[in-house]
């Protein structure tokens, strides 16, 4: 694989850009691999990348029933942060943030990471106490966050109305290192690096069954035939339950749709990410000028990837008081993603009852920000057969044992 550089751009410009290679290959599947990863989204591709980079396992296939990055990786609001309360959460999300900070250089692909800073607004006295607690916890964890006053919030976000009668801004939890990245570029960068290591990325290849022998996985039946493997990684987000059933076990998760929308593009007016958890809305401005807006999950289980009118109303009727300028904007587009939610709103990175079969799911509404850390931890689990320190507490049996990692209670929101 030729490296991307300013010299490569200049060279290709001189020959009318006719010499660019395809970013990744499209091979036919082999009969057997050392490892098969189901799901070519950000988490699956990151797992494959770190299997090769950190553990030298490169005879790997990443199979995807649709197109690469076409699931939740391409259907999120691109927020990146690590200011979580619980120690296991803060550890894996901060590992992800650290990897994001150098990911463009590591992959030789611009993932457009933008550490513009992230605000979590406190709009009730309960939130003030909760975020102050998180600041102290983050200090103990080595995660840089701080509490800022309403005046400091207004200085960072001049378009914000901090004195709203229903939802006044009483301060904010601020993480200067937080920000956004380009979701498609993250998937494409990992895919290009995986392909360069000789891994096979097989799109339009749906898993129809999981085979095992004597309690150990032997491969998967797909629409392109049987593909054997020594180890199997399941990284399919909202469809994790169905894939687990094929392997003969159940997961403590449910699938719901998470919706988002973007406005028409406008001139730059907000250069930080803002989360308002009391009203459950969050917003940033994209490089193209669109206001990227998200909110809560649907209140019922479903597998839709479409938006709905009630979501627009529920999200914007509360945000518009804090951001009055939103009332004057037109919506450009809207979409949904299928997220997998656990009871404590924390992920599963775990061995399963089927030997040599591993699961990575349950990221809920916060999966994009975790992609590098998730891949790092999942790769270590698959390579060694046992979880490392990042994944140790995210096993699927914690619900039976009562060892919850409850971020929904801690943060008041599951993002």
Image: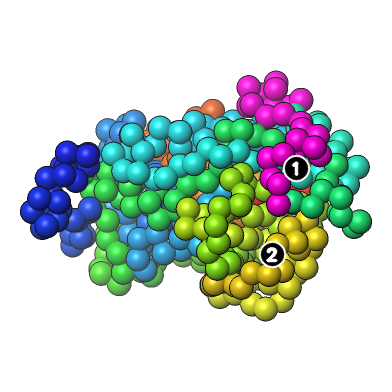
Q: Earlier in the sequence, mark 2 or mark 1?
A: 1
Which mark, residue 128? none
Q: Is 101 located above or below residue 218 in the figure?
A: above
* Image coordinates for residue 216, horizontal then vertical, percent: 39, 49
> Is residue 240 something that shows in the picture?
no
Q: Which residue is mark 1?
A: 154
Q: Secondary structure at mark 1?
A: helix
Task: Name which residue lies at 52% across and 46% down.
Answer: 180
- Asked whether the viewer can see residue 306, the reply is yes
Q: Give the side of residue 352 with respect to residue 310, left or right.
A: left
In the drawing, does residue 293 fall left or right of residue 352?
right
Write the residue at 75% across / 35% down. Answer: 152
Q: Nearer the viewer, residue 333 or 361?
A: 333
Residue 32: x and y, percent?
A: 23, 53
Q: Quadrant of the N terminus?
A: top left
Q: Which residue is identified by label 2? A: 326
Closer to the camera in the image, 353 or 186: 186
Establish if 310 lies above or below 346: below
Q: Nearer the viewer, residue 146 or 372?
A: 146
Q: Is residue 175 left or right of residue 210?
A: right
* Secondary structure type for disc 2: helix
Spatial CA distance of label 2 from label 1 is 17 Å
Asked if the residue at tag 1 contacts the one at tag 2, i.e. Cβ–Cβ closer than 8 Å, the answer is no
Indicate left or right for 312 with 380 as reference: right
Q: Residues within 10 Å of mark 2 (few under 14, many from 20)?
A: some
Q: Residue at x 55, y 57 (%)?
A: 267
């Amino acid at each position: 694989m030729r490296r991307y550089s300013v010299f490569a751009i200049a060279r290709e410009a001189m020959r009318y850009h006719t010499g660019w290679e395809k970013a990744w290959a499209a091979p036919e599947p082999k009969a057997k691999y050392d490892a098969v990863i189901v799901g070519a989204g950000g988490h699956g591709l990151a797992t494959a990348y770190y299997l090769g980079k950190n553990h030298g396992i490169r005879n790997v296939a990443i199979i995807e029933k649709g197109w690469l990055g076409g699931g939740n990786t391409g259907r999120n609001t691109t927020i990146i942060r690590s200011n979580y309360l619980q120690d296991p959460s803060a550890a894996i999300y901060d590992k992800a943030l650290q990897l994001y900070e150098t990911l463009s250089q590591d992959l030789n692909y611009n993932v457009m990471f933008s550490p513009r800073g992230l605000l979590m607004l406190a709009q009730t006295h309960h939130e003030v106490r909760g975020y102050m607690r998180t600041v102290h916890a983050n200090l103990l964890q080595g995660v840089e966050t701080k509490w800022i006053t309403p005046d400091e919030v207004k200085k960072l976000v001049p378009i914000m109305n901090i004195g709203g009668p229903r939802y006044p801004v009483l301060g904010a939890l601020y993480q200067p290192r937080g920000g956004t990245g380009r979701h498609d570029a993250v998937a494409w960068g990992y895919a290009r690096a995986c392909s360069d290591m000789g891994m096979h990325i097989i799109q339009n290849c749906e898993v129809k069954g999981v085979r095992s022998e004597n309690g150990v996985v032997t491969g998967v039946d797909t629409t392109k035939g049987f593909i054997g493997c020594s180890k199997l990684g399941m990284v399919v987000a909202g469809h994790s339950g169905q894939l687990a059933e094929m392997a003969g076990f159940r997961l403590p998760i449910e699938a719901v749709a998470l919706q988002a929308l973007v406005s028409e593009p406008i001139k730059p007016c907000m250069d930080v990410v803002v989360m308002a958890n009391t009203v459950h809305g969050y917003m940033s401005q994209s490089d193209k000028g669109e206001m990227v807006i998200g909110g809560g999950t649907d209140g019922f289980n479903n597998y839709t990837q479409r938006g709905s009118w009630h979501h627009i109303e529920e999200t914007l009727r509360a945000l518009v008081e804090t951001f009055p300028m939103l009332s004057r904007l037109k919506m450009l587009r809207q979409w949904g993603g299928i997220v997998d939610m656990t009871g404590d709103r924390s992920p599963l990175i775990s061995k399963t009852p089927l030997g040599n079969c591993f699961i990575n799911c349950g990221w809920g509404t916060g999966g994009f920000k975790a992609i590098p850390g998730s891949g790092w931890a999942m790769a270590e689990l698959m390579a060694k057969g046992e979880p490392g320190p990042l994944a140790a507490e995210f096993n699927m049996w914690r619900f039976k044992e009562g060892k919850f990692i409850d971020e929904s209670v801690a943060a008041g929101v599951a993002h």
